[in-house]
Amino acid sequence: MARKMKTMDGNQAAAHASYAFSEVAAIFPITPSSVMPEHVDEWATEGRQNILGETVQVTEMQSEAGAAGAVHGALAAGALTTTFTASQGLLLMIPDIYKIAGEQLPGVFDVSARAVASHALSIFGDHSDVMACRQTGAALLCESSVQEVMDLTPVAHLAALKGKLPFINFFDGFRTSHEIQKIEEWDYEDLKDMVDWEYIDAFRQNALNPNHPVERGSAQNPDIFFQAREACNPYYDALPAIVQEYMDKVNKKIGTNYALFNYHGAPDAEHVIVAMGSVNETIEETIDYMIEKTGAKVGLIKVRLYRPFATDAFLKAIPKTVKTISVLDRTKEPGSIGEPLYLDVVAALSDSEFKNVTVLSGRYGLGSKDTTPAQIVAVYNNKEKKRFTIGINDDVTHLSLEVGPAIVTTPAGTVNCKFWGLGADGTVGANKNSIKIIGDNTDKYAQAYFDYDSKKSGGVTMSHLRFGDKPIKSTYLIKRANFVACHNPSYMTKFNMVQELVDGGTFLLNCTWSKDEV
């Protein structure tokens, strides 16, 4: 089956796949997820049809709490329903997610995971929002790249229907949601092929209907509440196999090998990282570099289905030679004995053949802090620190790892370009167009990421563009560029821009000065 190559960001990939399986979208905008419902709204207005031959009914509510309530109501009435959110928006949906899961309704929440405000607000990416939902009963499915968002979002929709449970389908805010990549796009006919229609029928039969009344939303006393609460166990036990079944359908269609936990690295690895989200792309790239250069015995386990956590599948993914496992969490739970993914890994290993393996716990990437290959090498070199951080210099509690010199792991021949602009001067918009032109009109792989502060207009913007003949997994900022452009002459005295050029690179200064004045 041939799929069209198209250049888009993670939000558009999620919206494209979710639109196919949705009849209703209840929405409320919040950065960085707003782009998803914008696309859905636009396509519905244009009359795009989902796999059922209908246009999606889009309703904007007055808050995320309202959107979640509308999702609950639409699902109870038997409509395939989706919403899109992040951060505080997702937290406002938590009471409804408990109800939707408790009533076994197959809604999908597409989440571009973002930091929750604590000592300060951050509009940038980490996993603190989705981690606040792990006790709700929703399944949590994670993607690491724009292509994976396209490929695996259908799995969330299909497994929700068969498994009779809601899904939080999440990926990293900004780093995946706003990263533009050249990817393969689903054709709706292929998505239609993977649907088991009897589960849609069963969902419809279960809808509230005056012709066959049922009791919903009762209040229960101590005599039966606990028993009824435990009655959902078989559904959670069955869900991992259902998710794998639909991953296998996807694999068969497009030749991938998606699993609940995917391993990458040396077959005889002694130090393995366990992680979720866009950092996996950087870790893969770093592993390939380390193995090629030094034959390092290192590996990575990519967590895709985080809830329900399938211990058996996780243990099967671990190489038998492992001596140390470093778990990387993109969240902070102050006061806890360890971060959530770390605690799950420790619990999964406790009764297994790996119970004597050393498990280390690391934090990275909070509030979109950049995570580089050199930091990943530091994780593999770490033997001493049981709990650590990377990407910052922690001079308070001294948890940070010593990071060595920067390494270049991006595939040889990749062209790296960096554009410095002023928010709202058109630089970011022009670069979005440039990368789409390169992606859609050449046979090169292309990637673009836009780094700016929360002021947006009037702030500094840095556009990072890469293109080349090999797939690009560099989910971090460009520090060595073949081409650097400065679109605001006042930056010349404020920032080190020329210093980031490789030898023989090109520097473009956009200014009104004469050659001699420059």
Image (spheres, grey):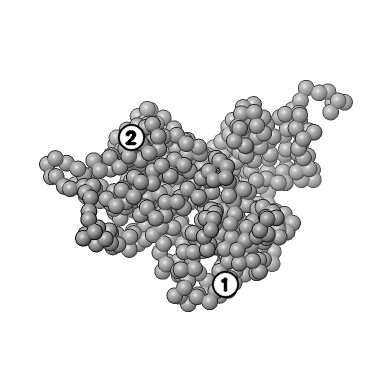
Badge 1 local density, few (<14 within 10 Å), some, or many (20+)? some
In the rendered structure, the answer to whether residue 113 lies left or right of residue 244 reads right
Q: Quadrant of the C terminus?
A: top right
Q: Is residue 2 above or below residue 377?
A: above
Q: Is residue 484 above or below residue 327?
A: above
Any part of residue 49 in sight: no
Identify the residue at image location x=75%, y=32%. Answer: 491
Distance from the alpha carbon under mark 2 to that under mark 1: 50 Å
Badge 2 local density, few (<14 within 10 Å), some, or many (20+)? many
Identify the residue at image location x=56%, y=59%. Answer: 328
In the rendered structure, which disc, 2 or 1, sits on the residue that comes first in sequence? 2
Identify the residue at image location x=72%, y=46%. Answer: 480
Image position, residue 463 (x, y; %): 64, 37
Residue 56's label in the rendered image is 2
Viewer-nearest residue: 513 or 401: 401
Per the image, label 2 sits on a secondary structure element best described as loop
Image position, residue 487 (x, y; %): 71, 29
Per the image, label 1 sits on a secondary structure element best described as strand
Amino acid type of the residue tagged 1 in the rendering: Thr
Foreground: disc 2 or disc 1: 1
Viewer-nearest residue: 135 or 24: 135
Residue 51's label in the rendered image is none
Image position, residue 294 (x, y; %): 69, 67
Q: Which residue is mark 1?
A: 358
